Amino acid sequence: MKSKKPLFITLAIIIVILSGFIYYRYYFVFGDGVKAGELNYVVRKGYVFKTYEGKLIQTGLRSKQTEHHTIK
């Protein structure tokens, strides 16, 4: 009777590689920072992990728009 040890070792390696890929893809933070501007819209999307994504209108030094905000 053949040993099943090589099958279990191969299966364990595949599980470790797959677990590492899932951790890197879904839990590893690849960017961090702060943006400023006016929020245009927000959408909740995603099949497995629901996230909020939005579009931000940023005004900069070269912007053609001049904005005047009044606080009431």
Image (tube, helix red, strand yellow):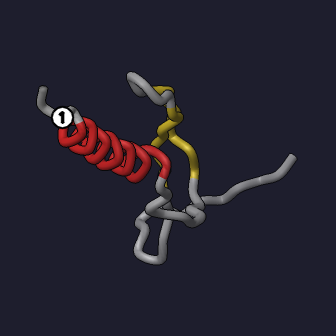
Residue 4 located left or right of residue 66: left
State the count of labels.
1
Q: Secondary structure at mark 1?
A: loop
Q: Along the line of sight, which residue is nearer the eye, 68 or 28?
A: 28
Residue 11 located left or right of residue 43: left
Q: Where is mark 1, residue-wise?
A: 3
Q: Along the line of sight, which residue is nearer the eye, 35 or 2?
A: 2
Classify 48 as above or below 5.
above
Classify 48 as above or below 32.
above
The disc labelled 1 sits on which kind of residue?
Answer: Ser
Q: Residue furthest top?
A: 47
Q: Along the line of sight, which residue is nearer the eye, 36 or 30?
A: 30
Give the residue drawn at x 49%, y 48%.
27
Residue 5 point in image, percent of width and height: 24, 39
Q: Residue furthest bottom?
A: 61
Residue 68 point in image, percent of width and height: 66, 59
